Amino acid sequence: MKRCCYCKEEKPLEYFGNLKRSKDGLATRCKPCDREATARWREGNREEHRRMCREWADKNKDKASINAKNYNRDNRAKRTAQEGYRRASKKQATPPWADLKEIEYIYKLANERGLQVDHIVPLTSDIVSGLHVPANLRCIPARLNIIKSNRYWPNMPVGG
């Protein structure tokens, strides 16, 4: 057992990270407290943190590339959702009230089932622009999504 210098609680040794320069070889803060303190520092020092990350990535291009590939592979649904959100944001199609967690879940579901996420009412069209919201998303096979394109949707008004 060891006492955390931050929260002052006695915790098992597994709760402490390694720190070679300390007498017992363990950090003085427990891991939860360390995460909290680090998050607070990052929040207060965003530019410094970004600069440090850029410097590390410049010095460790191989590791940074591998880390990015691994993250993208391990978080495919999240990255797909982010890419969809980015595209929709460019078109200002995501209202502030959109449930981003539900949107991410829809992309995850589509990925797990080998489907694509379709906007029922297209984001871009000559007639209307749909929203990037859960109610306008559905999971369909890629073939149907390609055929549909952005040309039609349910209850589409017929031009005359």
Image (tube, grey):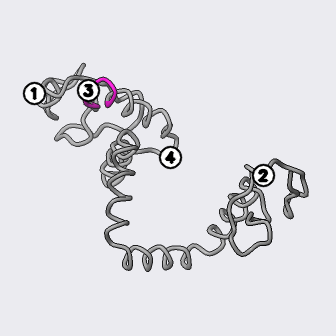
Q: Position of residue 39 (x, y in %)?
A: 65, 62
Q: For the residue labelled by badge 3, is the local secondary structure a helix, a strand or a loop?
A: loop
Label 2 and label 4: CA atoms lie apart by 44 Å
Stretch in magenta: 111-117
Label 1 and label 2: CA atoms lie apart by 59 Å
Query: Nearer the N terminus, badge 3 or badge 4?
Result: 4
Q: Amino acid at mark 1?
A: Ile
Is there a contact, CB below 8 Å, between mark 1 and mark 2?
A: no
- Per the image, the residue denoted by label 1 is 147
Q: Which mark is residue 13?
A: 2
Relative horizontal placement of residue 120, taking residue 51 as reference (left or right): left
Q: Nearer the viewer, mark 1 or mark 3?
A: 3
Label 3 and label 4: CA atoms lie apart by 29 Å
Label 1 and label 3: CA atoms lie apart by 17 Å
Query: Residue at point 28% right, 27% down?
Result: 120
Query: Nearer the N terminus, badge 1 or badge 2?
Result: 2
Q: Which mark is residue 37?
A: none
- Per the image, the residue denoted by label 4 is 96
Label 3 and label 2: CA atoms lie apart by 44 Å
Front-most of residues 19 and 89 = 19
Quadrant of the image for the C terminus?
A: top left
Query: Residue at point 88% right, 57% down?
Result: 3
Is there a contact, CB below 8 Å, between mark 1 and mark 4?
A: no
Q: Nearer the viewer, mark 2 or mark 4?
A: 2
Q: Which mark is residue 114?
A: 3
Task: Indicate the quadrant where residue 25 lies.
Answer: bottom right
Q: Amino acid at mark 2?
A: Leu
Q: Nearer the viewer, mark 1 or mark 4?
A: 1
